[in-house]
Image (cartoon, rainbow, N blue to C red):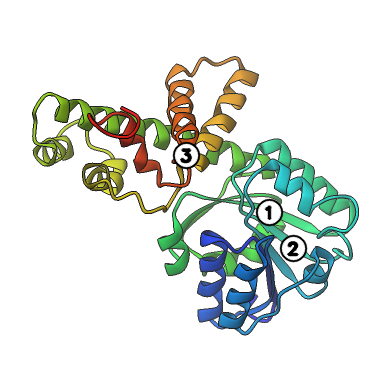
């Protein structure tokens, strides 16, 4: 895959760092595209790449195209019937990394197939640091033959890689991963916030949590940030709300009750309503610690 021309659509924090990682390893980043043109221009200069002015232009310049966009609406836009990545797509491989609904991934894969292209859904359970380091955890959905073709490239972005079956499976599993992560984050914020309200030292509480059944990966990544109010964005509250919403919609369609996830989505929606949606998900502590923005 090292000889393939690699294009990126969506070069925000995740997409840009994935492109940097591949460039470091000797891949040719042939073209980049982003609605925020200055972002694309800056990365293109850094990676000696080209800014595609249109989506068909990016397709023409690339053999493999990574898409890292925000939601179902954005996916519909970049894979529209005309004037999109599908124009001239025959022989291309699309690797779609956005956390969107399973239906969106399945619809895009079908449209790509009709235009002679192949598709993988590459759901990422990691953040921007791992994207830059090439240590992403990737759950890949799609045909086995396409996965095997792209596997060397995907391994260069990941420390752990798992093929999980059809395209839609990757999105389903990612929705459940983020559902549980978001619940854990909101629960940690409530525990630490209540501790502070009771006059306890949150650092002592965090240490005790780490040695007991209250321990979690979220405690390690977000606990100190909640206490110190350092909410630099690695995974935004607005994305947490969106992803919990995807999981809740799946639960509704399956007839499964998920009250904790529904409550968690409401917490992140409250952050958005307070104008704090672009802070890191750890900012949910602003709703639970006494004398903070939303408490």
Give the Cα separation between the discs numbered 3 and 1.
35 Å
Give me the residue at 45% from left, 32% from top: 268
User: Element under label 1?
Assistant: strand
Q: Position of residue 207 (x, y in %)?
A: 12, 41
Residue 173 is labelled as none
Residue 93 is labelled as 2
* Sequence-wise first label, 3 or 1: 1
Q: Nearer the viewer, residue 226 or 183?
A: 226
Question: Is the N terminus in the top left, top right, bottom left or bottom right quadrant?
Answer: bottom right
Judging by the rendered image, the residue that carries numbered circle 3 is 275
Q: Position of residue 252 (x, y in %)?
A: 61, 19
Residue 120 is labelled as 1
Give the Cα separation between the discs numbered 1 and 2.
8 Å
Image height check: is 282 above or below 131? above
> Which label sits in the foreground, 3 or 1?
3
Give me the residue at 44% from left, 41% from top: 276
Give me the residue at 57% from left, 71% from top: 19
User: Element under label 2?
Assistant: strand
Q: Nearer the viewer, residue 225 or 104?
A: 225
Q: Position of residue 84 (x, y in %)?
A: 83, 58
User: Element under label 3?
Assistant: loop
Give the Cα separation between the discs numbered 3 and 2.
38 Å
Kindly indicate the quadrant of the structure image that contains residue 9. Answer: bottom right
Q: Residues within 10 Å of mark 3 (few under 14, many from 20)?
A: few
Proximity of marks 1 and 2: CB atoms separated by less than 8 Å: yes
């Amino acid at each position: 895959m090292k000889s393939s021309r690699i294009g990126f659509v969506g070069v925000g924090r995740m997409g840009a760092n994935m492109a940097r990682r591949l460039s470091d390893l000797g891949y040719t980043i042939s073209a980049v595209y982003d609605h925020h043109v200055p972002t694309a221009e800056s990365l293109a200069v850094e990676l000696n790449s080209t800014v595609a002015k249109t989506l068909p232009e990016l397709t023409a310049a690339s053999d493999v195209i990574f898409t890292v966009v925000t939601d179902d609406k954005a996916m519909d836009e970049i894979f529209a019937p005309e004037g999109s990545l599908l124009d001239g797509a025959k022989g291309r491989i699309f690797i779609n990394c956005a956390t969107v609904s399973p239906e969106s991934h399945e619809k895009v894969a079908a449209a790509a197939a009709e235009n002679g292209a192949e598709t993988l859904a590459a759901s990422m359970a990691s953040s921007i640091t791992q994207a830059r380091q090439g240590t992403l955890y990737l759950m890949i959905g799609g045909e086995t033959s396409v996965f095997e073709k792209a596997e060397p490239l995907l391994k260069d972005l990941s420390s752990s890689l798992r093929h999980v079956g059809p395209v839609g499976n990757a999105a389903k599993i990612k929705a459940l991963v983020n559902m549980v992560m978001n619940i854990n984050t909101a629960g940690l914020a409530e525990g630490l916030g209540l501790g502070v309200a009771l006059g306890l030292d949150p650092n002592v509480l965090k240490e005790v949590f780490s040695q007991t059944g209250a321990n979690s990966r979220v405690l390690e990544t977000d606990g100190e940030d909640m206490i110190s109010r350092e909410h630099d964005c690695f995974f935004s509250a607005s994305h947490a709300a969106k992803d919990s919403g995807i999981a809740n919609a799946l639960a509704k369609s399956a007839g499964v009750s998920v009250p904790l996830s529904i409550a968690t989505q409401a917490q992140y929606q409250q952050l958005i309503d307070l104008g704090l949606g672009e802070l890191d998900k750890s900012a949910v502590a602003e709703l639970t610690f006494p004398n903070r923005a939303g408490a």
